[in-house]
């Protein structure tokens, strides 16, 4: 077994192009997934590639480097539209986990209960993938294709998450329901981003729900309903069960499907209230 820890992105991409490597970032999903077993593939530890770190503001987008940790995100001074992401950051595991775990690892692991996904969906996040032969960008909603499935090719790594400037507006909020308050895998989690217009109306509305389908989903019908409505807590009255009909909550060790079915509506209501009250 080989272990490589390049310091240059170029070196990492060369290695990926010429062999079969398992990428290692914070290791907080990687190592638990091994259980009692030793790693089977060669390990490409990307944690020393400095250019994959940090959040930067560009002319037409925000760029979140793949190695940015949840602790980094929680500590950064970011516009209000990132509040849902910041709130999700402090709900991921414990402080120790947040100090190690990266945002890209959360997305590449592609768990239905990944807390980062709903908060990034409401920001219309795009995923930047790099390989030796070039870079491609695709929406997060296409990148995660199923439970633990992504469209990452074996010679690529996730280099950054891109938030278009046009979507970096308004205020956002995150709500997580688990079987206890902290250190818990979500039963349901929701994110909401709302932009208030000059007449006190909703100009933009983005709502997403996680842990109630293989991949977290936006709620386009509810979003449509919210547009042009008065920006106050009466928005919660517009939530109805049919807006969630494309979700497929399952029975599992954490909750029965019918509990998730009602909890997701309540979770969305609470996230909308938080976004309204924070305005
Ligand atoms: C005790 C505990 C509590 C947790 N609590 C939560 C929680 O509350 N909410 C939650 O959402 N998650 C939770 N997690 C899961 C985990 O911490 C997060 O998903 C974390 O963000 C994963 O990041 P990482 O850097 O540790 O990824 P790693 O474990 O290093 O990698 C995870 C996967 O992503 C791949 N990968 C990583 N980076 C890249 C990249 N740049 N390009 C391509 N592939 C890459 C790896 O190959 C691996 O398959 C918890 C984990 C533990 C151990």
Image (cartoon, rainbow, N blue to C red):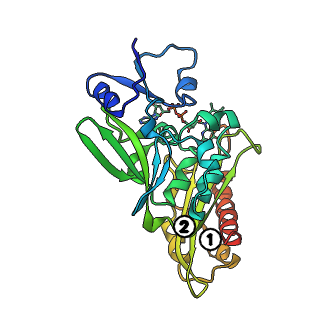
Q: Is residue 85 above or below residue 11?
A: below
The image position of residue 49, as x and y in percent, is 43, 32
For numbered disc 2, what is the local secondary structure?
A: helix
- Residue situated in front as seen by the camera: 239 or 31: 31
Instruction: Find residue 239 and name its label.
Output: 1
| Disc 1, SS | loop
Q: Quadrant of ligand 1?
A: top right
**Name of the residue lying farthest toward the bottom:** 199
239 up-or-down from 55: above or below: below
Mark 2, residue position: 243
Is 20 on the left or on the right of 225, as rendered? left
Q: Residue sitting at 38 percent across and 51 percent down?
A: 142
Instruction: Identify the residue at image location x=61%, y=56%.
Output: 77
**Position of the C terminus by quadrant:** bottom right
State which quadrant residue 156 falls in.
top left
Q: Dot 2, how many residues are within 10 Å of its Cα: few (below 14), some (14-19), or many (20+)? A: some
121 horizontally vs 239: left or right? left
Residue 126 pos. (x, y %):
40, 54
Label drawn at residue 268: none
Instruction: Pick out the residue farthest to the top.
Output: 1
Q: Is residue 257 visible?
A: no
Quadrant in which the N terminus is drawn: top left
53 or 30: nearer the viewer: 53
Q: Are marks 1 and 2 in contact (CB under 8 Å)?
A: yes
The percent position of residue 98, horizontal first and vertical second, equals 63, 38
- Residue drawn 65% across the image and 45% down it: 186
Q: Quadrant of residue 10?
A: top left
């Amino acid at each position: 077994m080989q272990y490589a820890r390049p310091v240059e992105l170029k070196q990492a991409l060369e290695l990926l192009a010429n062999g079969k490597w398992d990428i290692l970032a914070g290791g907080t999903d990687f190592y638990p997934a091994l259980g009692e077993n030793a790693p089977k593939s060669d390990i490409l530890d990307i944690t020393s590639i400095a250019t994959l770190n940090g959040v930067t503001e560009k002319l037409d987008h925000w760029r979140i480097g793949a190695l940015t940790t949840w602790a980094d995100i929680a500590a950064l001074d970011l516009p209000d539209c990132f509040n849902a992401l910041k709130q999700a950051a402090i709900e991921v595991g414990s402080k120790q986990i947040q100090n190690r775990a990266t945002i890209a690892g959360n997305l590449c692991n592609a768990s239905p209960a990944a807390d980062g996904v709903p908060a990034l969906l409401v920001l219309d996040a795009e995923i930047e993938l790099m390989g030796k032969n070039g870079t491609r960008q695709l929406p997060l909603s296409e990148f995660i294709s199923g439970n633990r499935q992504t469209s990452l090719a074996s010679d690529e790594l996730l280099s950054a998450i891109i938030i278009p400037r046009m979507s970096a507006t308004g205020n956002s909020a995150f709500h997580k329901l688990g079987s206890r308050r902290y250190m818990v895998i979500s039963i349901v989690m929701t994110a909401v981003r709302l932009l208030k217009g000059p007449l006190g109306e909703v100009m933009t509305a983005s709502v997403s729900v996680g842990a109630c389908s293989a991949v977290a989903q936006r709620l386009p019908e509810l979003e449509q309903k919210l547009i042009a409505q008065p920006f106050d807590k009466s928005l919660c009255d517009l939530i109805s069960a049919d807006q969630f009909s494309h979700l497929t909550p399952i029975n599992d060790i954490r909750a029965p499907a019918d509990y998730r079915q009602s909890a997701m509506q309540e979770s969305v209501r609470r996230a909308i209230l938080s976004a309204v009250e924070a305005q």
